[in-house]
């Protein structure tokens, strides 16, 4: 494809997962020769395994203790990963660039106060005027600052405060689709000349009982131990193992990136989301339409691990891209809902930027690569609805 | 392409061809406009839940929509559906909409009734703080897909997308109290990008609950002047003491002017410009110098390709909190200077309260209606003006005045600022 100043390029990657903190930590594991070992916590939330947060020195990206205290882990992780992406792109100390930078955050909701909720429901079991009790307890027990630490758009708000990104601030919601729309929207704006540089991403904390409860509503979790994502056992739950992930990207127009001499990891050639009924091959029809014309050597699949969806996605890509290597990155770092799509794009950009093959994440179900990929497809098929794909090309 | 369909930057002009609205004043643009220009308040005593021990006992809830289950998701969806039906009928569009959907919706959490139900079917506490472990045990025994669906942020746009046949992956967004304006901005951008000829922009908020109210109360954001309810919201007065939480929804059908004219649609106005600028000062407070708000208003004017002299009326954010009204006044003064005194500025929130996620879109609809009818809605409850805020707030009674361009402001927690310039159809 001919290069243009309006191309959307990736110049910053900020990734935190159970595997570690930052781009380099992930590159070392996924671009090596051997299959990386997932980090899994099986005790704390048993019977639900999760991929936990790594050790993080928050002050590296959130220097003020006061700022750290104003956030719960979900916002903190997002602000931290956003800082890594800005650092990686060389924008961290560029106040002018940050003040004109656009931002789209894919957000869920913040943490509940488990102790307050428990106290209220326990007391309510003994009362028949539950709504009155609710007023009494919430008025006296809720921390006023918790509201802001829970509020979806306050991840973006905290990024503005901590990193001074203030060109614009938009928060998209809607689970996995929010991450897809965030990238799709930022890319469309850059291509149309409405934006020159943008911070895009999200964060997800798996180690939360309130979130675990939500997915258990549909029996979505794998139970017991970790197992490879393409071979999860139907006798051990639904197949999803969630992972704590913060994943932000800096996207720029090629013209803007080249003018400042930025390192370009990859170009986003195409990004699109869609939705609809998935029955009777309709999901595959939509995927087929979206990937038409693409010839990736690598597919980074964001599959949830849900048995049926994982099997269908793998079968689809083995059929349409028989030569491509498939990597289910959710098996390695867990499913991270709003952060899933940008995490996958970050991993793909690392591989393309370094010009190295990606090690199989699951030796038994993923084939080795002998050559580095020139183009990579990133997918995220939502656990309930919505799907998205992005096609990335190496910046040759 | 002929210039009549392009703006000062050569972009497609974006027309509004359909509008729908619901607030505590009623359902539909006609009823709302009659009440709004009649100076009627929709604020009332809360009956949805007990108000014992609450310092704020009033709201602008929407209690007249039929719901299959009374929760925030069902209410927000129902209002969005109704305003969209109205807007599409006005636009003369039937069948699949076939353009993207941008939805501003409130972040929702499980209802307390759902937690109580789980507690009832779970075992008793074994230790303090273990309620979620018990909830999980109960859920393992009997999963509850309805619980899961009710807390997904994508569930409202999913239903709207299916019902109205929108195209692609819908965007559900939140920029707090600026969300409605942001939804419109996203629609405008999509049309300017040439991605689509039309976009459905919807904003809805049916999330008033005890917990929502208490959260805002704990931040001292709400008026506690409960008696009488209709007098509580009094923007720009000396005795304003907070906003009144409220519900509502609005839908705007956006269309390239060219496509609207080509299909013979009636054009109700145009979205001439959008501006935004985030504030990095504080989580709930605006920069003391009003810099980001000033930049937002200037960005909207610049995007519209007009000078400040083009603005004939301002639909203020005007929440009736001590801080917002002072800050908004200061920012407007910086942009409009001495002329501000002669620009009428009114706050719809004096009558409908603060519809939060929906406010930017609800007030955009009323701004367009102001242009269409040549009637300025009043700021009611303006009995005791704040002497430090010298504004013509269209006090208490509507005024007949033709305006051709309106500035509509929306600001929110998290440093969110968005302004729209809405104008009459170009002749």
Image (cartoon, coloured by chain):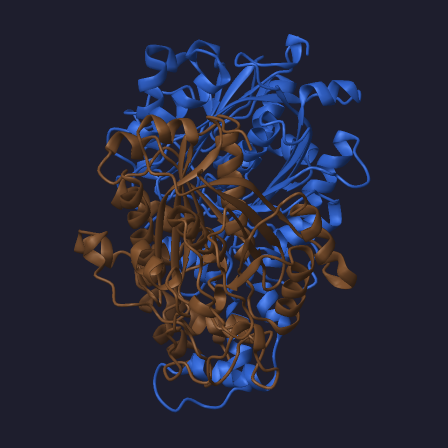
Chain colours: A brown, B blue
Height in image: B3 above or below A288?
above
Instruction: Out of B381 and B65, give the one closest to the viewer.
Output: B65
Exactly how many numbered labels are in the figure?
0
Q: Position of residue A357 (x, y in %)?
A: 44, 57
Q: Residue at x 47, y 20 (%)?
A: B303
**Whole-percent x and y of residue A395?**
44, 39
B31 or A204: nearer the eye? A204
> Quarter of the image containing the C terminus of chain A?
top left
Q: Is residue B136 above or below residue B223?
A: below
Q: Quadrant of residue B358?
A: top right
Q: Is residue A231 above or below residue B409?
A: below
Q: Quadrant of the N terminus of chain A?
A: top right
Q: Quadrant of residue A237?
A: bottom right
Q: Residue furthest right?
A: B95
Q: Residue A381 at x, y = what percent?
A: 59, 59
Which residue is at 31% across, 19% downward?
B334
Q: Residue most toward the front?
A: A370
Can residue B284 be seen by looking at this rendering? no
Q: Which is nearer the eye, A360 or B327?
A: A360
Q: Is residue A91 visible from the viewing direction of this image?
A: yes
Residue A13 lies, in percent from the top left, at 36, 48
Query: Would you say B128 lies left or right of B265 here?
Result: left
Q: Seen in the image, is A204 located left or right of residue A191?
A: left
Residue B258 lies left or right of residue B233; in this view the side is: right
Q: Nearer the viewer, residue B327 or B255?
A: B255
């Amino acid at each position: 494809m001919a290069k243009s100043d309006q191309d959307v390029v990736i110049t910053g990657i900020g990734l935190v997962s159970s595997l570690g903190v930052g781009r380099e930590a992930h590159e070392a594991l996924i671009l090596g020769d051997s299959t990386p070992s997932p980090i899994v916590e099986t005790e704390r939330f048993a019977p639900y395994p999760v991929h936990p947060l790594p050790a993080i020195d928050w002050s590296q990206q959130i220097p003020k203790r006061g700022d750290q205290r104003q956030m719960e882990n979900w916002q903190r992780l997002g602000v931290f990963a956003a800082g890594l992406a800005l650092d990686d792109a060389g924008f961290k100390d560029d106040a002018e660039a940050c003040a004109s930078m656009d931002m789209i955050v894919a957000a869920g909701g913040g943490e509940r106060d488990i102790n307050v909720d428990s106290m209220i429901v326990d007391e309510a079991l003994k009362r028949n005027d539950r709504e009155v009790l609710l007023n009494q307890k919430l008025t006296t027990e809720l921390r006023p600052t918790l509201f802001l630490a829970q509020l979806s758009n306050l991840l973006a708000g905290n990024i503005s405060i901590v990193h001074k990104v203030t060109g614009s601030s938009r928060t998209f919601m809607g689970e996995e689709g929010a991450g897809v729309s965030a990238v799709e929207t930022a890319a469309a704006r850059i291509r149309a000349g409405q934006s020159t540089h943008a911070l895009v991403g999200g964060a997800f904390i798996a180690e939360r009982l309130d979130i675990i409860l939500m997915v258990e509503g549909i029996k979505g979790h794998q139970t017991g131990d970790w197992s490879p994502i393409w071979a999860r056992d139907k006798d051990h739950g639904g197949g999803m193992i969630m992972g704590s992930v913060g994943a932000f990207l800096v996207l720029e127009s090629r013209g803007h990136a080249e003018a400042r001499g930025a390192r370009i990891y990859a170009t986003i050639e195409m990004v699109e989301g869609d939705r609809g009924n998935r029955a009777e091959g309709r999901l595959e029809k939509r995927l087929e339409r979206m990937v038409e014309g693409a010839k990736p050597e690598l597919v980074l699949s964001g599959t949830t691990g849900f048995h049926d969806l994982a099997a269908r996605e793998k079968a689809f890509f083995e059929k349409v891209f028989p030569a491509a290597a498939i990597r289910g990155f959710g098996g390695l770092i867990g499913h991270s809902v709003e952060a899933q799509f940008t995490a996958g794009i970050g991993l793909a950009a690392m591989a393309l930027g370094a010009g190295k093959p990606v090690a199989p994440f699951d030796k038994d179900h993923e084939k080795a690569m002998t050559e580095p990929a020139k183009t990579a497809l990133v997918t995220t098929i939502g656990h309930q609805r919505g799907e998205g794909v992005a096609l990335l090309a190496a910046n040759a | 392409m002929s210039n009549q369909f392009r703006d000062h930057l050569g972009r497609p002009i974006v027309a509004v061809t359909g509008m729908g609205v619901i607030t505590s004043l009623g359902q539909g643009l006609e009823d709302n406009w009659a009440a709004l220009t009649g100076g009627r308040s929709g604020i009332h005593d809360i009956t949805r839940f007990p108000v014992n021990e609450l310092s704020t006992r009033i709201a602008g809830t929407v209690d007249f929509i039929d719901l299959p289950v009374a929760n925030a998701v069902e209410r927000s969806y129902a209002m969005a559906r109704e305003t969209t039906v109205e807007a599409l009928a006005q636009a003369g569009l039937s069948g699949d909409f076939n353009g993207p959907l941008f939805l501003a919706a409130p972040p929702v959490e499980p209802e307390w009734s759902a937690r109580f139900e789980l507690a009832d079917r779970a075992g008793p506490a074994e230790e303090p703080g273990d309620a979620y472990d018990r909830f999980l045990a109960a859920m393992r025994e009997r999963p509850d897909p309805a619980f899961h669906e009710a807390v997904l942020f994508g569930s409202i746009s999913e239903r709207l997308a299916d019902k109205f046949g929108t195209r692609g992956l819908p965007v559900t967004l939140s920029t707090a109290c600026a969300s409605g304006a942001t939804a419109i901005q996203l629609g405008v951008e999509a049309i300017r990008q040439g991605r689509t000829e039309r976009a459905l922009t919807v904003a809805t908020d049916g999330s008033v609950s005890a917990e929502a109210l208490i959260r805002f109360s704990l931040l001292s954001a709400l008026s506690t002047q409960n008696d009488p309810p209709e007098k509580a919201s009094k923007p720009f007065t000396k005795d304003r003491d907070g906003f009144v939480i409220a519900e509502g929804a609005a839908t705007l059908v956006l269309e390239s002017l060219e496509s609207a004219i080509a299909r013979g649609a009636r054009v109700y106005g145009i979205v001439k410009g959008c501006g935004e600028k985030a504030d990095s000062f504080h989580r709930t407070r605006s920069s003391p110098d009003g810099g980001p708000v000033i930049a937002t208003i200037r960005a909207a004017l610049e995007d519209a390709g007009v000078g400040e002299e083009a603005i004939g009326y301002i639909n203020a954010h005007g929440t009736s909190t001590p801080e917002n009204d002072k800050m908004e006044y200061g920012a407007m003064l910086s942009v409009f200077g001495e002329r501000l005194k002669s620009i009428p500025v009114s706050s719809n929130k004096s009558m409908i309260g603060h519809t939060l996620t929906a406010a930017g879109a609800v007030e955009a609809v009323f701004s367009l209606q102001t242009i269409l009818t040549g009637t300025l809605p009043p700021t009611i409850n303006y009995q005791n003006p704040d002497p430090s805020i010298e504004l013509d707030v269209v006090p208490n009674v509507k005024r007949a005045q033709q305006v051709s361009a309106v500035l509509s402001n929306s600001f929110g927690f998290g440093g969110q600022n968005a302004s729209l310039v809405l104008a009459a159809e170009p002749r």
